[in-house]
Image: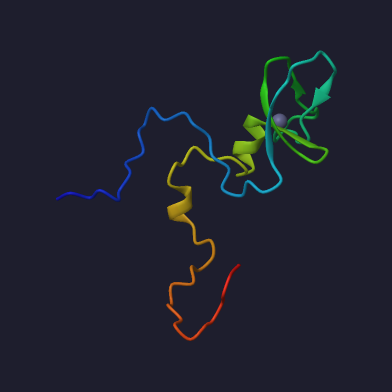
Amino acid sequence: MDSEDQIEPSPDDKRLYLPQHEGWEGRVKSNSTKEYCYYKSPGEDYFHLIVIGEIYLIRGDEKCCLNCAIRHGVVTLDRLHWQNRVRRKKPSVFNPGSSSSKG
Ligand SMILES: [Zn+2]
């Protein structure tokens, strides 16, 4: 029963993944300028201060702490996110008729 294609997610895996990573960048807060998370937690009436040394995400002007990123589904701990969701269909049909000469 060798399943070499199957990657088992470890319960100790603390890595974070962005299924829709386009436009997002990871940053480390490295100065004392006050910056706030773009989102509020449910029931809270304030934006989260991003503190020095904190890892956060940024997309354009939108800063997002990791808590909010996880809550909003921007970030997942699911290593197999790329398997569990249907992205786009691969063009798996071999088309011998297409004469696409590159270069
Ligand atoms: Zn936040």
Q: Is residue 3 left or right of residue 64?
A: left
**Which residue in the rendered view is the most extreme toward the bottom?**
97
Residue at 61 percent across and 39 percent down: it is 71
Q: Position of residue 29 (x, y in %)?
A: 73, 20
Q: Residue sitting at 49 percent across and 62 percent down?
A: 86
Left or right: 90 with respect to 24?
Answer: left
Question: Is the image coloured rainbow, by chain, by secondary structure, or in one colour?
Answer: rainbow
The spot of residue 20 in percent (x, y) is 61, 49
Query: Against 65, is 33 above or below?
Result: above
Name the spot of residue 40 as percent of width and height, x first.
75, 33
Residue at left offset 25%, top offset 48%? 4
Image-based side of 78 in relation to 6, left or right: right
Using the image, determine if residue 51 lies above or below residue 23: above
**Residue closer to the observer: 43 or 28:** 28
Q: Residue furthest left?
A: 1
Location of residue 57 by image quarter: top right
Q: Residue furthest front?
A: 103
Residue 10 in the image: state x and y as whole percent: 35, 33
The C terminus - image quarter = bottom right
Displayed-image quarter of ligand 1: top right
Is 87 drawn above or below residue 76 in the view shown? below
In the image shown, does 21 or 96 lie closer to the viewer?
Answer: 96
